[in-house]
Image (spheres, rainbow, N blue to C red):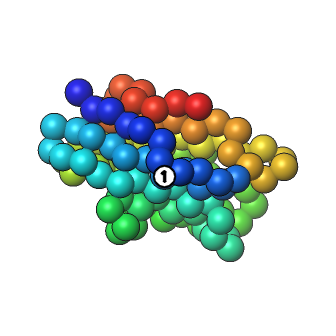
């Protein structure tokens, strides 16, 4: 079973501490890039996408050997309106 706790946030970022059977990982979503967004795990890029027209709603990557998905919604006011983290198909963090 995996758990996640929010450790920081801003308009277009989320920082989570993620605990899995493999250990503790720092996860960061950063939507502030000029033309790109990225998800970092332990300060290393896990997924980076180009977002020319609008924000990408889904990121698939790994945390250790676990499959992870971040789903993001961004409002027209340029702030996160929805944020979910799934590990192996189970939502472990949602706002």
- Which quadrant holds the N terminus? top left
Percent of width and height locating residue 35: 67, 70
> Can residue 60 be spotted in the picture?
no
Quick check: can you spot residue 74? yes
Q: Residue 12: give x, y in percent of width and height.
A: 66, 55
Q: Is residue 9 left or right of residue 63?
A: right
Residue 48 lies left or right of residue 79; in this view the side is left
Camera-side residue of 17 and 44? 17
Q: Residue at x 27, y 40 (%)?
A: 19
In which quarter of the view is residue 81 placed?
A: top right
Residue ranking furthest to the bottom: 34
Callout 1 secondary element = strand
Q: Which residue is mark 1?
A: 15
Residue at horizontal 74 percent and vertical 49 percent from the top: 79
Q: Position of residue 2 (x, y in %)?
A: 28, 32
User: Could you tell me which residue is drawn at 68 percent across and 45 percent down?
Assistant: 80
Q: Count neighbours of disc 1 (C-alpha within 10 A) and say few if under 14, some if 14 to 19, many if 20 or more.
A: many
User: Height in image: 89 above or below 25?
Assistant: above
């Amino acid at each position: 079973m995996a758990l996640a706790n929010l450790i920081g946030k801003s308009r277009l970022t989320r920082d989570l501490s993620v605990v899995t059977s493999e250990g503790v990982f720092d996860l960061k979503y950063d939507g502030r890039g000029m033309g790109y967004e990225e998800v970092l795990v332990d300060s290393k890029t896990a997924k980076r996408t180009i977002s020319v027209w609008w924000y990408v709603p889904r990121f698939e990557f790994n945390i250790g050997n676990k499959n992870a998905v971040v789903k993001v919604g961004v409002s027209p006011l340029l702030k996160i309106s929805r944020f979910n983290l799934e590990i192996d198909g189970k939502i472990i963090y949602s706002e």
